[in-house]
Structure formats: C-alpha cells, structure tokens
Image (tube, rainbow, N blue to C red):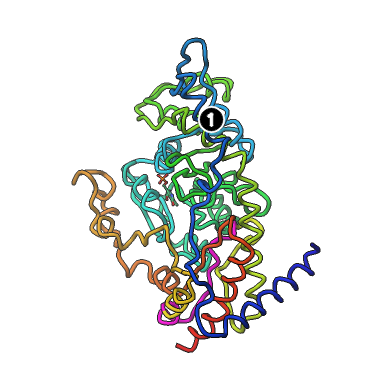
Amino acid sequence: MERRKFVAAAAGAATAAGQAAQGAGPVREKPLRDEHWGPLYYDAAEKAQVDEVVDTGVPFRFTARRGVAPVKVATYEREFATKIGTRYALALSSGTAALECAMAALGVGPGDEVIMPAWTWHSDCTAVVRAGALPVFAEIDESFNLDAKDIEARITPQTKVIIAVHLQGNPADLDPILEIARKHKLRVIEDCSQAVGASYKGKRLGSMGDIGTYSHQESKTITSGEGGMLVSSDAELFERAVRFHDVGNIFAPHKAMLGETKLAPFVGTNFRMSEFAGGVMLAQLRKLDNIIAAARTNASRVYDGLRGIPDLKFRLRPDPLGDLGSPVFVRFDTKAQRERFLELMKAENVPANGPGGSVILPIQSYIENKIAAHPSWPAWTSARGKAIRYGAASCPRTIDILSRFGGVPVGPKYTRQDVDDIIAAVRKAYPAALRT
Ligand SMILES: Cc1ncc(COP(=O)(O)O)c(C=O)c1O
C-alpha cells in the first residue's frame, strides 16, 4: 500500500479502536504476551542444523571426525561478516565474552579508562573491570543511549575507549560519538547486543566503530540460547581477539580470513562457540532480515496509530529507519504519570514497562563500593580509581529520564488485532495518565 494511504488507514483503525476502548472494560480480554523474537522463528531449519551435528558427530569447531570437517561456526562467521559489512567476524560463547575479547584486542588494561553509558547491561562494566581498567560512566539522552554531549567532560589522559551501546533496538547517535573519538584519538566499541541487525544511516550497527559486539542470548533478535559475536575490519584487532578467545591459538578458519598472521601467542581464555550453536545461529541469521522487517512493520503501525495524541512525545530515535522498532516508548513529565500509565495499561491487558534489560550501573552496589573479585585488583587501586565517585549523584539525568518513560513491546508476530489493541490502550491510558 502507498505509504500515505497506509498511514491514513492505520490512523483510521486506531481511531476506531480508540473509540471502542472508551467503553467499559479492558481493551483486551487476555494480556498481550511479550515474547522473545528468535525462538518464535525456530523451525525445521534449526532442527536440521542440530540433527546434522548429531548425525555427523562433529560438535567441536576445530576438529574433523571420520572425515567430516566442521563448517557451521566458520560459515556462520562468514555470513555474519557479510551481513554486517565488516571484513572479519568471530563467533563466541556470549556477548560478555565478545566484550572481553574486545578489551583484549584493544589492549585495554590497568591504568586505562573506558567511557560507557550509565544505563546498560553489567557486562560492559565487568569486561572493563576484568581487564583491570577503570569504568567511567556518562549520562544517557532520551534515546536511552550514550549522550555524546556528556562524553568530553569524562575524558582524561587515561581514556582509551568509548563503548557506544545500542539499547533496546535503538541505534545510539553515532556520528557525534565517532567525531569525539577521532578528535581525542580514542577507540570505539559498538555494543550491539540488544540491537542485532539494526542500522544507523544505512550501515549495520557494529560496522562503524573499531569493533562491534553482539549477544545471542535468548532475549536477543536471533538466538541459540547463549552465544555472541565480535566483528572488525582491522586485521590486528581481529587477530588479537581470535587469540584471546582460544588460549592464544589461531586455527585454519581465522588464518584463512586474515591471509597471514602477524602476532605471537599471548595469554587468553576459552570463549569458543560449539557447532551446535553455530548451526542454530546460521539458521537464525538467514531469517534475520525477515524478523526485523516484520517487527518494523508492526512498530511503524503503532507509531503511526499514536500520532496526533496531543503532547505525545516518543523516545528519541536518532535513525527511525534503522531502529528495530520495539519497544515503543512514550515520555511523561513526571515519574508519577509514568507509574499511572503502567497501571492503566495493565488494566487494559496491554502491559507496559519502564526501560528494561539494563541496569543503572553507577548505583549497583559492587560498582558504587568498587568491589572486584580480589581487593588488589587494579581497576580501582590507582589514585584515579580511588578518587572516582559513582552512585546516584554521578548520573542524575540518567535516573530522571529512565523514570519518565513507559514502553510497550511490539513483537514481529503480533497480529493486526494485537497492534490495534496497543494503539487503543495507549490512546486511552496516555491522556488519563497525564491528568495524574
Ligand atoms: C547491552 C548488552 N551488552 C552485553 C550483554 C551480554 O550478553 P550475554 O548475556 O550474551 O553475555 C547484554 C546481554 O543482555 C546486553 O544487553
């Protein structure tokens, strides 16, 4: 359908649904479910991949058995790099492992500082602390991602890396972040764990920084239950990541990617992906664009259906076309209004939530109190590590923003009725919450 006609039709449907919702009783009889996307798409393709590994008895990515060579993880890496638009990709056991490999690749260690948003998942911080470096937190903006305007004040001569995290499907505003990084000669990691497949200004997330990292844990766009990925187009960074992920080794598939290896082994760990996970991820990757297209179609119907509500403000989206679309967040002036909105939405059987899937890192007790696995761990033993203050006072804007947004998940498999119900419920609950 032509876009203008579609928008008009969506608005019409929304109005009708909104009018119906003015009547007694909730918009829905049963609560709308919030399902994680990847497993919804499991079918014969994933089954065939797993069966093949069982049938061939080749579960380890680097060892052939009975003349059968393992190919699944290696194929997955090649197809992932092509999809993202980088030269190299390294499959890993988790998104946390990917961040730890990124630290090792970039040579982050004691004395270094790494800037990240105050609101993100633990792993961005734990990877830095486990490397022996100092985590430094900057405020977020109303995209819920790193606010580029708050980065420069946090830079010191020890700053080495900025982690730009793309949260809840929504790309961070990368252009100003990359400009600051270039100006101060800093490296950029894009943590795309919560936005696998999303893009910014036409380029896939993960391809614009020095390194991109991804999670394949169950709640992510595509999943093997656990898993992760690291991408880069820099041969040296990639070789360092590969060696770190496999106790200093580098084997045939990665040698073939690089053409030649240049580095001596150094101390690493084991973050390898199994052929089972590789097979499932290969099947999931081949569905990624369909999953994203379905999610975006439903989300854009919700956005279109909500437009026109007086004073309505959405979460900031630096590139709406690159956003995965879900959840759709609306803004309130006060926390009390947001809380009322959540209550009203629950009563409509269309549950809404505050921003989720991350934590406010500076107020986590282990960070506020600077507790590593060993008291002499170098992260917080330097003069700067001792002096830095975390806690709520270090990120007031982040805490305020997160307290004033409510969002509705929009799944790729939601029906037209589900989408209309979301629109109707928000049209009913939002103005009522504003009156709180
Ligand atoms: C932003 C972000 N980074 C890193 C991770 C870590 O990924 P994993 O759970 O696969 O270790 C997550 C997981 O939720 C995440 O949301």
Measuring from the top left, give residue 281's x and y in whole percent.
Answer: 53, 37
| Quarter location, residue 415 | bottom right
- The residue sitting at the top extreme is 67
Residue 191 visible here: no
- Secondary structure under tag 1 reads helix
**In the displayed structure image, the side of residue 38 where residue 286 appears, left or right:** right
Residue 225 lies in the magenta stretch: no
Q: Is residue 81 above or below residue 350?
A: above
- Residue 329 among magenta residues: yes
- In the picture of the structure, the residue carrying the numbered disc 1 is 49
Residue 344 in the image: above or below residue 321: below
Query: Quick check: 359 above or below 47?
Result: below
The residue at the point 51 percent across, 28 percent down is 73
Region in magenta: 324-339
Question: Which quadrant does the C terminus fall into?
Answer: bottom left
Residue 43 appearing in the image = yes
Q: Position of residue 267 (x, y in %)?
A: 34, 27
| Residue type at tag 1 | Gln
Horizontal and vertical percent position of residue 244: 40, 30
Residue 306 vs residue 384: left or right?
right
Q: Quadrant of the N terminus?
A: bottom right
* Along the viewing direction, whichever of 218 and 124 lies nearer the viewer: 218
Front-lying residue, 132 or 142: 142
Front in this rendered view, residue 296 or 164: 296
Residue at 18 percent across and 46 percent down: it is 375
**Image coordinates for residue 142, horizontal then vertical, percent:** 51, 68
Residue furthest to the bottom: 435
Q: Please report the residue visible at 50 percent of the width from the left and 65 percent of the height from the top.
A: 32
Residue at the (62%, 75%) spot, across then down: 306
